[in-house]
Image: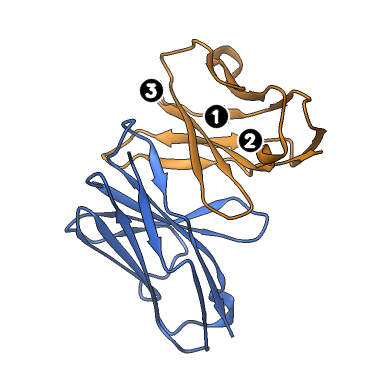
Chain colours: A blue, B orange
Amino acid sequence: GAVVSQHPSRVICKSGTSVKIECRSLDFQATTMFWYRQFPKKSLMLMATSNEGSKATYEQGVEKDKFLINHASLTLSTLTVTSAHPEDSSFYICSASGGDPPGAQHFGDGTRLSIL
Amino acid sequence: AQKVTQAQTEISVVEKEDVTLDCVYETRDTTYYLFWYKQPPSGELVFLIRRNSFDEQNEISGRYSWNFQKSTSSFNFTITASQVVDSAVYFCALSDPSGSARQLTFGSGTQLTVLP
């Protein structure tokens, strides 16, 4: 149980393109979803926390107009990187809590975004 | 403020050796959760364990064991008889119990390489 699916796993696109990443909890209802960014050989950096039906809470320094987060249902959250540029290239990982055990975050497989 | 320190950046061992990954944390909360996650080269984060701050019993799961010492604010992870498949980055994390969203504070990770 507590499976989180993230798509796509890899995206390569031109500068200026907007990219949408989906995060789904497959076998539990995710009351809260989290979006992280990870640079090579670095730890995970929390970007934002999203609760179903409400606006996401962004961490300091994260541009909310750049990284649009929508949490429309208890099983789906999306991150849209708008007008992506090469500096947005990174590994993005979502996680969801609400499964078992309580308090644990379960992670998707990540999306490797490369902006040319 | 919460902080997780994984002082070991990289560790290399030969297969079948035992290896301990250190984790030291700081928090002012009396109730919190501690976690270990594994990130293999493919990128996904795999949940390994959650430990409640009130439960100081050590835990063993197959070749994995965890030593929680509240007196020294440590939550160390030992792999017995390591295998090549154990090669990965291991993250220790601490949860923030405030509010309904349990945000995680991650350590910087320890890259474990198990050589054949």
Q: CA distance from mark 3 to mark 1?
A: 12 Å
Return the chain for callout 2: B
* Residue found at x 48% / y 66%: A9
Contact between marks 3 and 1 (CB within 8 A): the answer is no
Image quarter of the C terminus of chain A:
bottom right
Q: CA distance from mark 2 to mark 1?
A: 8 Å
Judged from the image, the secondary structure of the residue bearing numbered disc 3 is loop
Instruction: Give me the residue at 29% from left, 38% from top.
Output: A99
- The location of residue A4, given as percent across then percent down, is 36, 51
In this rendering, do the residues under marks 2 and 1 share a single chain? yes
Q: Is residue B61 left or right of residue B24?
A: left
Identify the chain of the residue marked 3, using the numbered disc in the image: B
Label drawn at residue B5:
2
Are tags 3 and 2 found on a single chain? yes
Amino acid on which disc 2 is placed: Thr
Q: Which residue is mark 3?
A: B31
Decide which of tag 3 and tag 2 comes sooner along the chain.
2
Residue at label 1? B26
Q: For mark 2, does the 10 Å Cα neighbourhood hold few (<14), some (14 to 19), or many (20 or more) residues?
A: some
Q: What residue is shown at x 38% (from left), y 36% (from top)? A: A104
Label 2 secondary element: strand
Image coordinates of residue A90 in percent, x first then y, are 56, 68
* Identity, as a three-letter code, of the amino acid under mark 3: Thr
Which of the two discs, 3 and 1, labels the residue nearer the N terminus?
1
Q: Is B107 rendered above or below residue A93?
A: above
